[in-house]
Image (tube, rainbow, N blue to C red):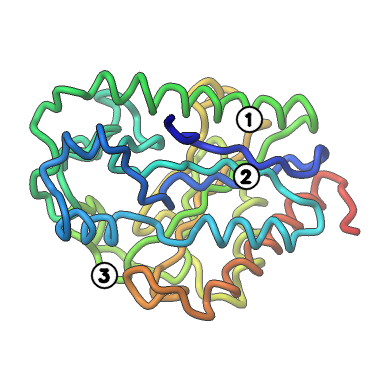
Amino acid sequence: MDTPRFRLHPGDPASPVLLHVPHASRTIPARVREGLLLQGEALARELDLITDAHTEVIAERAARAASVTPWRFVNERSRLVVDPERFPDEREEMRAVGMGAVYTRTTHREPLRPEPPADEHTLLDTYFHPYAQAMTQAVADRLAATGRAVVIDVHSYPSRALPYELHGTGPRPPVCLGADPFHTPDTLLARAREAFAPYGDTAENTPFADAYIPLEHYGEEPRVTALMLELRRDRYLDEPVTPHGGLARAAAALANLVDAVSREGGLSPA
């Protein structure tokens, strides 16, 4: 029996915050692995480079430490299965380097799947679309319960640019804050800068930009706000995957951000 492909971890019913962790898993089902051109050590190395290692731990610890527990939506599959944050069509700029919703190239732009992949539609139907529907419902539930939804995407990125990065020549701050012009208000950015000030300097939309919003709400619903949090990996890992003391500091900063967002909605920390 296939294990759950994603999990929604409940938070406080009054919390508008949804911590979204899309890229932490290394799990690739056997039938999907069979369609990959990398196997063994080569695949393990690619997983080291492409996985946002331990970001699910950061989100979990932050949720436990927050005064008002946020909800958490966690992908239980590697982004090498599908990447749930990509556009599934020609709108996705990462298709230019073989990294649309279904990757055909590696972080070093080497072949990962045949092009075009024979199982692309099956992968989208099995993994991408159900994930998108569940995430859309999770955001709708926060809207219905609290009148707003705040999606905080929890990511990480390597200290040195990898060849797949389209915008890898810019600054690589300890904390990159991805902002959307419609869905990321200045107040949310300000709260994030304040919360992460003890952790390290922040910059906006470099080296990665924008934030994840379910397409049903994208550009339409101002009560859905979003921020992409990108932590430079050397600040909490001995790269590529071994955590150090910076992980606890990252979780504490994220908990402070969750509390600040909750207070803005009138929720009083215990």
Q: Residue at x 14, y 22 (%)?
A: 118
* Badge number at residue 160: 3
In which quadrant is the N terminus drawn? Answer: top left
In percent of width and height, residue 75 lies at 47, 41
Residue, disc 1: 138
* Badge number at residue 90: none
In which quadrant is the C terminus drawn? Answer: bottom right
In percent of width and height, residue 267 lies at 87, 48
Q: Residue at x 30, y 25 (%)?
A: 123
Residue, disc 2: 72
In percent of width and height, residue 181 lies at 50, 40
67 with respect to 196 (left or right): right
Question: Looking at the picture, does residue 68 appear above or below residue 176?
Answer: above
Choose top left, top right, bottom left or bottom right for residue 169.
bottom left
Residue type, numbered disc 3: Arg
Question: Looking at the picture, does residue 250 appear above or below residue 155?
Answer: below
N-terminal label among 3 and 2: 2
Measure the alpha-carbon separation of dots 1 and 3. 34 Å
Query: Pointer 2: residues within 10 angstroms few (<14), some, or many (20+)?
Result: many
Front position in the image: 138 or 87: 138
In percent of width and height, residue 149 lies at 68, 36
Determine whether label 1 and label 3 are within 8 Å by CB: no
